[in-house]
Image (cartoon, rainbow, N blue to C red):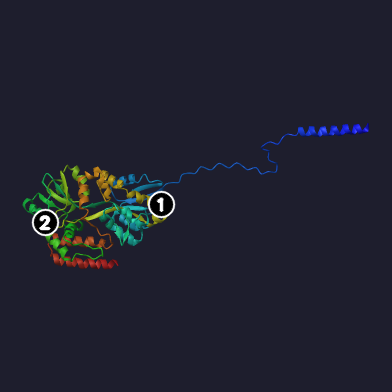
Amino acid sequence: MKKYLSLILAALMVLALLTGCANTPAESADPEPSSTATIAEPPESAEPVEPAEPVEIVIWHENNETIAGTIQEQLSDIPGVTVKLERKEQMSDALKMVGNDPEAAPDMYLFAHDKIGVYAAMGILAPITEFVSADAFADIMPMAVDATTYKGEQYSIPIYFETLLFMYNKALMDAPPATTDELLELMKSGTTADSYVFVEQHSTSYNSAPWIQGFGGYILNSDAAPGLGTQEFQDALAYHKQFIQYQPSDGEYNTVTTLFTEGKAASTIGGPWLVPDLNAAGLDLGISAMPTLPNGEPLKPFSGVQGIQVLKHAAADKPDAVKAVLEGLLRPEVGIALANIANSAPVNLKAYDDPDVAANEMIMVMRDIAANVVPMPNIPEMDVMWTVTDNLLAAVNKNGEDIKTTCEAAQAEALEQIAAMQ
């Protein structure tokens, strides 16, 4: 009996164990982590990144606002850079004062090339080739590249140029003379007490340079040697003096400009800066290439190449922005805009492919004579030559002093002043 009772109890125990196993919940496919497991925190959302402030490039200038505004507009699409052109009166002197002071100096400036040597010698300019390669100038007029090179370094992005032109009143002169001898004969037969065939600023260095350089002479060469005592210089003065006797004796800017504007002179030699006022006066203006001298060479005026130069502090502090601006200035669209809006002759040859530029009589004449112009010397020694040469010309042309004696004295004075600069 006891044996059966033991068997029954054992069976009940097995049944209870099986029932307990059946009631145990099955493990889930994704078990809950144990209380000791490390729970990863969800990543924090990233803070929104503020766009970087654009880098400001300040460019000083002394030009009219049409030119400055056009350049600023052409540079308005450079990513991450804001270009601001600021007018600065007496900029040449101001640049000498502020030097490379980043608090006072601009980043760049727009100016004629002839002061490059002065500022390079001061040590405030950065060579342009630190930012653009020489290949970038392939479409720039060679004259403009030469003008903006000082001691083998390129210091400017040339943009446009100015030079003297032969201008005539179509109502008074049917066609421009092809040669200076032809012009002289017209002056002899057509000049009267109150009307002139031709007038010019005959006794200033800049305006006499076409005659001097056409004869193969020079005021100052690239080696800083004055040429006032050379035979070519003296021959040019002697030939030119024939024309001066049929012009107003003072040869001043206001006299010359007024006579031509009022129709009392049939022709003149002047710069493109005269054109807006002449057009406003209703003059039937003609513009032509320079007449040819007896030696077969044309009159060869100076050229002034306007371009952008970079100060060293900007080159060091804002190199990427400087590079972007300089590359922007090399686009032909800049020259096209200046030609069409400001009547300025571009130095980028591709700009002349634009049909509106190609239809501009004055600008196309300037393009054609660019091969014969002489860039103003950009070396510091030229600063003393303007006054010395002006005094020489006044003595010869206005006071009738002997050419040879006066030229030799002026040459000695120029050498003395240049030596004092060393």
In this rendering, the answer to whether 222 lies above or below 274 is below
SS of the residue at dot 1?
Answer: helix
Residue 414: name its quadrant: bottom left
Residue position marked by numbered label 1 in the rendering: 320
Q: x, y (%) of residue 213?
A: 18, 59
312 relative position to 387: left or right: right
* Residue that mark 2 sits on: 243
Percent of width and height locating residue 220 = 23, 63
Where's the C terminus, which quadrant? bottom left
Q: Residue at x 15, y 51 (%)?
A: 268
Q: Nearer the viewer, residue 39 or 204?
A: 39
Neighbor class of circle 1 (other Cα within 10 Å; few <14, some 14-19, many 20+) is some
Instruction: Give the answer, above or below, for where 296 lies relative to 354.
Output: below
Q: Nearer the viewer, residue 6 or 288?
A: 6
Location of residue 305 (image quadrant) = bottom left
Residue ID at (36%, 47%): 84
Residue 216 pos. (x, y %) = 17, 61
Give the quadrant of the N terminus: top right
The amino acid type found where label 2 is placed reads Phe
Amino acid tagged 1: Asp
Q: Give the Cα separation between the discs numbered 1 and 2.
A: 54 Å
Q: Residue at x 35, y 50 (%)?
A: 327
Q: Is residue 393 above or below residue 28?
A: below
Depth-wise, is mark 1 or mark 2 nearer the camera? 1
